Amino acid sequence: MAASSETAPLLKQASLNKANGEAFNGHLQDYDTIPASDETRGLETTWKIETKLLARYSAPLVVTYVLQYSYSFVTVLVAGRLGTSELAAASLAAMTAEITGLAVYEGLATSLDTLTSQAFGAGRKQQVGLHVQRMIALVLLVTIPIGAFWICSPWILARLVPQKHVAYLAGDFLRFYLIGAPGYGVFEAVKRFTQAQGDFMGPMVTALICAPLNVFWNWLLVFVSSGCALIKTSADLK
């Protein structure tokens, strides 16, 4: 088998050998016709075993996605404490970020679900890493047009939303949101890297660390900063 490299194709044509030794391409043997080996003979499964396996793998995955989507929820919730205009701006910005940025990252990274799983199952562990590296490079490349749109979002949203001040606030939100956008995309790619190897705990632990930090930064940068600005304004009036 040829060594994996950066110039190796992502997908290769399947090539298996027939029982008589004749090679053929593009055809897969039927599962039922493959004779059971000494290692696989006697292995059985039941719905109880499969249910336990699915529950064990899906539980940390569900927690990971809940924590990920809590980021925008916490931000909108905090913005709602500042006023109706801030709440509308945060909701508009979060929706725009989801559609024009985060959905793109998740869609690109989803292709790794197939590529990395197939490579790891075939024993091509080096190819698994190459798939992820290529996806990280693609994510960073896609961030350029996404960032350009978010930087220009105050003027773009102002043409779509009647409330101009809300559009400008949402645009400012997206500009700051752009700082963490590449990290979100890289996280989506690396998450598939661990999941392809059956490790669902790594992404969950990362989300468990980042979710409380998100709450803390929202509290610090919104309420504490607003309180300090209010105190300074009162002192200037005196």
Image: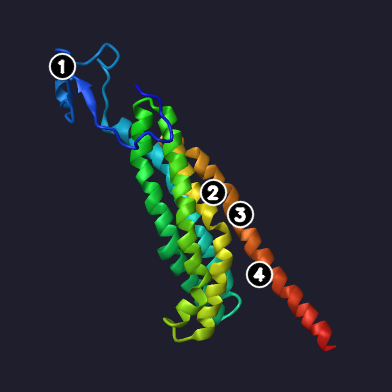
Badge 3 marks a residue whose secondary structure is helix
Q: Which mark is residue 207?
A: 2
Amino acid bearing label 4: Val
Whether tag 2 and tag 1 are in contact, CB under 8 A, the answer is no
Q: First in sequence: mark 2 or mark 3?
A: 2
Amino acid bearing label 2: Ala
Q: Which mark is residue 69?
A: none
Rendered-image quadrant of the C terminus:
bottom right
Q: First in sequence: mark 3 or mark 1?
A: 1
Farthest residue to the right: give it.
Answer: 238
Kindly report the distance in space between the C-alpha atoms of the residues bearing marks 4 and 2.
22 Å
Badge 2 marks a residue whose secondary structure is helix
Q: Which residue is mark 1?
A: 22
Amino acid bearing label 1: Glu
Q: Nearer the viewer, mark 3 or mark 4?
A: 4
Name the residue: 43% across, 45% down.
135
Kindly report the distance in space between the C-alpha atoms of the residues bearing marks 3 and 1.
59 Å
Kindly report the distance in space between the C-alpha atoms of the residues bearing marks 4 and 1.
69 Å
Q: Which residue is mark 4?
A: 222
Whether tag 4 and tag 1 are in contact, CB under 8 A, the answer is no
Q: Which residue is mark 3?
A: 212
Q: Is residue 144 above or below residue 204?
A: below
